[in-house]
């Protein structure tokens, strides 16, 4: 579009959720609910969305989009849709 106007779809809202020890990587105001609403570029991949939060690679274990598993090989190319929920869990040991 001429004149530097932005399209309405220049950004979209998603929910970004971190669980267990990963909640420490969220902004302080979001840690209680373990989630933050983000405005992201529709072309941004999961890896690009996560990168600014500085999560150690070895702690990004289980990645879900709307409850569906995203394999490690897909995270660098997979994009999201408006309203999606991106959730990340660290490895969890239990008995």
Image (cartoon, grey):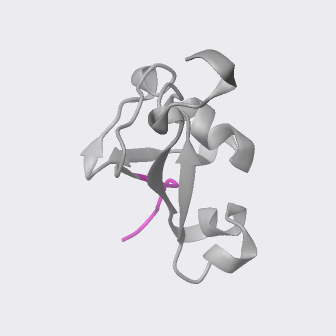
**What range is drawn magenta here?**
86-95
- What is the x, y in percent for residue 52? 73, 43
Task: State whether residue 57 appears in this view.
Answer: no
Name the image quarter holding the C terminus: bottom left
Q: Nearer the viewer, residue 49 or 88?
A: 49
* Residue at x 58% of width, y 31% of height: 6
Residue 87: within the magenta? yes
Q: Nearer the viewer, residue 61 or 93?
A: 61
Determine the image quadrant of residue 26: bottom right
Compared with 21, 38 (above or below) is above
* Residue at x 72% of width, y 68% of height: 27
- What is the x, y in percent for residue 42? 47, 31
Compared with 47, 88 (above or below) is below
- The secondary structure making up most of the magenta span is loop
Task: State whether residue 53 appears in this view.
Answer: yes
Name the image quarter holding the N terminus: top right
- What is the x, y in percent for residue 65? 33, 45
Determine the image quadrant of residue 47: top right
Residue 94: within the magenta? yes
Compared with 26, 14 (above or below) is above
* Residue at x 56% of width, y 54% of height: 38
């Amino acid at each position: 579009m001429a004149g530097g106007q932005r399209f309405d779809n220049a950004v979209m809202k998603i929910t970004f959720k971190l669980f267990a020890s990963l909640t420490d990587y969220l902004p302080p105001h979001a840690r209680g609910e373990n989630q933050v609403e983000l405005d992201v570029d529709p072309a941004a991949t999961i890896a690009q969305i996560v990168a600014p939060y500085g999560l150690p690679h070895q702690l990004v274990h289980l990645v879900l989009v709307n409850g569906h598993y995203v394999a490690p090989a897909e995270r660098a190319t997979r994009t999201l849709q408006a309203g999606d929920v991106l959730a990340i869990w660290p490895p969890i040991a239990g008995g």
